[in-house]
Amino acid sequence: MHYNTSQTDVKFTAKGENAKDSVFNRRIFKAYKNTFRITVENHNATNADLLVNGKHVSLEKVLSSNTGVELDIGDLVQDGYNTLKVSNIQPENAYLKVYVPFPKLKKSDPAAAGFSSAKLDKIDALINAEIEAGFPGAVLQIIKDGKIIKRTAYGYKRKFADGGRLMDTFDPMELDTVFDIASNSKMYSTNFALMKLVSEGKLDVNKPVNEYIREYKGGRRDEVRVKDILNHIAGYAPEVSVGSVIDKILGGE
């Protein structure tokens, strides 16, 4: 059996008495109480113990079958993080595979979850005002305690055609629109690393780059500060010319 949407997909094998082995027979997973199921596959085990948050789960059906068995553990889980532990697997060459799905979210009335509908309307008005001012669009989802409080699409997912031409009609934003957040990863990873180095006194953004990268020198490079690169005023073109890069790789000028 295959479970491509599992947050935990683990093969638990028989271990010896070494205390270090016990470190590898447990996992942490996220769930919401009352309704939650996991699937356990038995591979030749005649005995095993499964505990969720320290409480035993009956494996009678699992141990009598060599196919995946779904177990209801809704009364054992809590909202948030939970622990799962497998031990005492016998015989030595046997193992269990445990699949823990991602928790399913359910819609909820905002008032029932303690949210003000009037304030949520203000959020709608704020985002729509930004769209009228030129912002393309957005998708907002608010989740609390495993319940979807609000899920709304605003504006447009595309306003410009390839090449930068403004489209005659815009593609509306959808709830399942996928966003490219690659630039966010650059921003967060770089900025957090720089903040740490600055806080530790290992980096001064007002100093020339070649204070830290000795090979970065010659011409105007000697004057470029770390701060200049961060502020995009180091003098570099806004994009790479693919043709010139290929020429250099091939040995051209």
Image: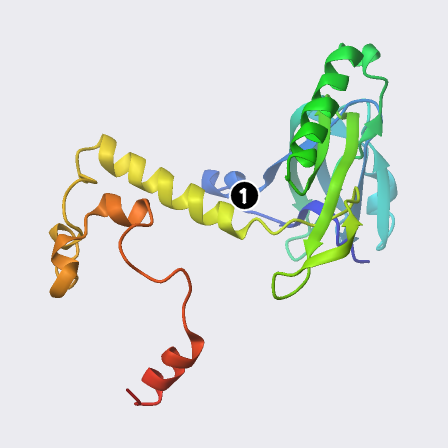
Q: Say whether residue 52 is visible.
A: no
Residue under label 1, please give it.
24
Find residue 182 and report its horizontal and vertical position in percent.
53, 52
Q: Is residue 226 visible?
A: yes
Q: Position of residue 56 (x, y in %)?
A: 74, 28
161 lies left or right of 201: right
Instruction: Indicate the secondary structure of the residue bearing disc 1.
Output: helix
Q: Position of residue 194 (x, y in %)?
A: 30, 40
In this rendering, the answer to whether 88 lies above or below 80 is below
Please give the name of the residue rendered at 25% of the width and 47% of the height, measured from the top-left corner: 228
Left or right, 226 with respect to 245, comes to left
- Of residues 232 and 55, the one nearer the viewer is 232
Question: Label 1 crowding class (10 Å Cα cut-off): few <14, some 14-19, many 20+?
Answer: few
Residue 218 lies, with reference to residue 182, above or below; the image says below
In the figure, residue 118 lies in which quadrant?
top right
Q: Closer to the camera, 212 or 103? A: 212
- Residue type pointed to by label 1: Phe
Task: Pick the residue in front: 174 or 16.
Answer: 174
Q: Quadrant of the N terminus?
A: bottom right
- What residue is drawn where x is 78% and y is 31%? 151
Q: On the picture, is 249 further left or further right than 204?
A: right
Percent from the top left, x then y, of residue 126? Answer: 68, 24
When asked about the image quadrant of residue 162, the answer is bottom right
The answer to which of 16 and 27 lies nearer the viewer is 27
Q: Residue furthest bottom?
A: 251
Q: Quadrant of the C terminus?
A: bottom left
The color scheme shown is: rainbow
Q: Quadrant of residue 220?
A: bottom left
